[in-house]
């Protein structure tokens, strides 16, 4: 496995790749969710690359950029064990040199709602860094997790709108045994908060249960989810959404593929989760 720090060195290594290249962009502090993406990339391509870069432009001024967990040596050992060929781990100055002035901004409903509404500027930061990473890595296929459902839609939109020559593959959310969706941010949770955080997956299970019993009224399901979350004293709802899975427009009736998603603060930690119904 080669670990490459600069854009010029990565381009040089890329030129030597024969066949297809699978790519897994990450912000590091890897968990089994990331590794499931690496495994899918390994299975579907001749070569596998991953990036590790905590992208400052996708964090808001009062978000967790400075305390975001980092452990490069641990990440590299995990990637090596999965048979990764190339790791791109640039510094902030490599990705955003002085005078950097170009941004990619997906406009319209896809970024106006949910995470886009709660985190102004977040998707502009994601879109810009992912576009840069795609230009540097030149992957055949890029792998993202369904846990960041809206991010996956935004990236598919960029690839389509900017005629990028790669395939975006979205893999299922990986969960802890008790249902908590894996996230690098789960390390922030203290013992009591870790327990309280189960309210996210439980409220999604409740939605699935109501729906499978025939409930099609979206507001009734949202209301039941909110009640369940509000019964947990450590949890504070940011949003609970039942939306069209491709446009993210809120639904009145569950009569098409729906993305049920939520963002909840547990203590100081903001967690997101979703299912498709
Ligand atoms: O999902 C993530 O970890 C990040 O948003 C990504 C796609 C690596 C861009 O920084």
Image (tube, grey):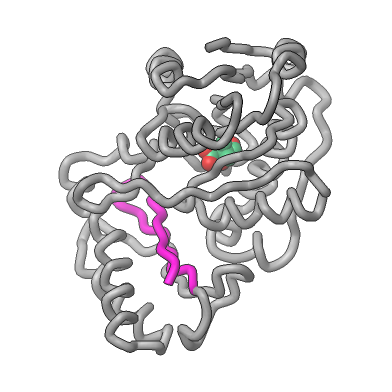
Where in the figure is residue 175, as x and y percent of width and height? 31, 48
The answer to whether residue 61 is seen in the rendering is no
The range drawn in magenta is 258-277
Tell me the residue at 20%/69% (across/down).
Answer: 231
Say which quarter of the image contains residue 107. Answer: bottom right
Q: Quick check: is 101 in the magenta stretch?
A: no
Tell me the residue at 57%/26% (across/down).
Answer: 48
Quadrant of the snapshot with the C terminus: bottom left
Tell me the residue at 42%/13% (across/down).
Answer: 73
User: Which residue is at the front of the view, 88 or 16?
Assistant: 16
> Does 201 sit left or right of 262 as displayed?
left
Q: Quick check: is 275 in the magenta stretch?
A: yes
The answer to whether residue 222 is seen in the rendering is yes
Say which quarter of the image contains residue 19. Answer: top right
Say which quarter of the image contains residue 189. Answer: top left
Q: Is residue 112 above or below residue 214?
A: above
Where in the figure is residue 95, as x and y percent of width and height? 71, 24
Q: Quadrant of ligand 1?
A: top right
Tell me the residue at 58%/61% (across/down).
Answer: 117
Q: Is residue 51 above or below residue 222?
A: above
């Amino acid at each position: 496995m080669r670990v490459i720090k600069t854009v010029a060195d990565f381009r040089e290594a890329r030129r030597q790749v024969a066949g297809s290249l699978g790519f897994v962009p990450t912000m590091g502090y890897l968990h089994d969710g990331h590794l499931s993406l690496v495994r899918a990339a390994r299975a579907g391509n001749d070569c596998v690359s991953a990036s590790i870069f905590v992208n400052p432009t996708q964090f808001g001024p009062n978000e967790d950029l400075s305390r975001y967990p980092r452990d490069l040596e641990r990440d590299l050992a995990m990637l090596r064990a999965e048979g990764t060929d190339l790791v791109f781990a640039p510094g902030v100055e490599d990705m955003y040199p002085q005078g950097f002035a170009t941004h990619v901004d997906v406009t319209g409903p896809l970024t106006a709602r949910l995470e886009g509404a709660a985190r102004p500027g977040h998707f502009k930061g994601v879109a810009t860094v992912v576009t840069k990473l795609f230009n540097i890595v030149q992957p055949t296929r890029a792998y993202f997790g369904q846990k960041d459902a809206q991010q996956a839609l935004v990236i598919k939109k960029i690839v389509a709108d900017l005629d990028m020559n790669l395939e975006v593959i979205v893999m299922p959310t990986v969960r802890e045994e008790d249902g908590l969706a894996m996230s690098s941010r789960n390390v922030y949770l203290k013992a009591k908060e870790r327990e309280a955080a189960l309210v996210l997956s439980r409220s999604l299970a409740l939605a699935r249960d109501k729906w499978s019993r025939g409930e099609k009224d979206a507001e009734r399901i949202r209301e039941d989810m909110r009640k369940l979350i509000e019964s947990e004293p450590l949890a504070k709802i940011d949003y609970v959404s039942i939306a069209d899975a491709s446009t993210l427009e809120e639904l009145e009736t569950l009569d098409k593929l729906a993305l049920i998603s939520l963002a909840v603060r547990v203590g100081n930690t903001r967690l997101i989760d979703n299912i498709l119904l």
